């Protein structure tokens, strides 16, 4: 089965997910970026994270920002050598060896057109966020079930196995960490 490659418009996704800070400065932006990485880490399998690239705009201090970072097995690209993140995403789509396996996550329809031109797929950030929220483990009263992340290109099937109290506690902590304000 073909593997799906994700290219995520970072700040666009943060806006759509309600994770973008009200007050914008270097610290709040960095915290929002970390929150996004933790959210995706909880939703995506390790293999999916290996094939995920998040692209962020860089407006200031371009010489101080690394062009590439790795967080939780995901590639973070800072558009320091491009006019903006959209330009870098367009280049990634254009240069991808197997564009039919690419899913571009952005509400920017300029990027949707760029994806379609190479037979890649595109999805609005809001819709992708909803899909990812459905993957988060759920705490159900009186019966704890394990909800695993399913690959993006496979249907979600319910699981009927129970989880240990340690696993439930672990996921409750992870979810609280994802949504706490920093």
Image (cartoon, rainbow, N blue to C red):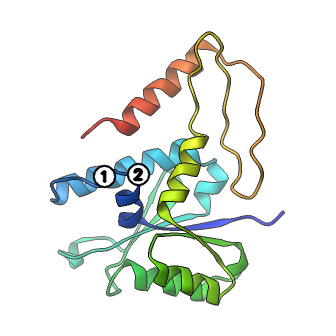
Above or below residue 25? Residue 18 is above
Q: Residues within 10 Å of mark 2 (few under 14, many from 20)?
A: many
Quadrant of the rendered image containing residue 156? top right
Q: Which residue is mark 1?
A: 32
From the top left corner, tell me how far across and down residue 71 is, in percent.
45, 54
**SS under mark 1:** helix
Front position in the image: 11 or 58: 11
Above or below residue 98? Residue 7 is above
The reply to whether callout 1 and callout 2 are in contact (CB within 8 Å) is: yes
**SS under mark 2:** helix
Above or below residue 139? Residue 110 is below
Q: Position of 140 compared to 150: left or right? A: left
Rendered image: mark on residue 133: none
Quadrant of the rendered image containing residue 161? top right
Above or below residue 177? Residue 112 is below
Real-space CA distance between mark 1 and mark 2, rounded to the nearest whole angstrom: 6 Å
Q: Residue at x 48, y 58 (%)?
A: 126
Q: Which residue is mark 2?
A: 36
Q: Residue at x 40, y 38 (%)?
A: 178
Q: Please identify the quadrant where the C terminus is shown.
A: top left
From the top left corner, tell me how far across and down residue 27 is, in percent.
18, 53
Front position in the image: 121 or 90: 121
Q: Residue at x 52, y 46 (%)?
A: 41
């Amino acid at each position: 089965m073909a593997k799906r490659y994700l290219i995520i418009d970072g700040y666009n996704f943060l806006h759509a997910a309600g994770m973008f800070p009200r007050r914008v400065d270097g610290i709040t932006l960095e915290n929002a970026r970390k929150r996004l990485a933790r959210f995706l880490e909880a939703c995506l399998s390790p293999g999916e994270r290996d094939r995920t690239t998040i692209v962020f705009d860089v407006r200031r201090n371009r010489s101080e920002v690394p062009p590439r970072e790795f967080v939780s097995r995901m590639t973070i690209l800072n558009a320091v050598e491009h006019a903006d993140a959209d330009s870098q995403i367009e280049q990634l789509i254009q240069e991808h060896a197997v564009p039919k396996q690419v899913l571009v996550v952005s509400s920017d329809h300029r990027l949707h057109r760029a994806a379609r031109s190479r037979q890649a797929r595109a999805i609005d950030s809001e819709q992708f966020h909803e899909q990812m929220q459905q993957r988060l483990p759920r705490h159900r009263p009186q019966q704890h079930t394990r909800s695993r992340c399913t690959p993006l290109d496979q249907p979600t099937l319910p699981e009927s196995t129970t989880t240990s109290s340690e696993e439930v506690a672990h996921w409750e902590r992870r979810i609280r960490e994802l949504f706490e304000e920093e």
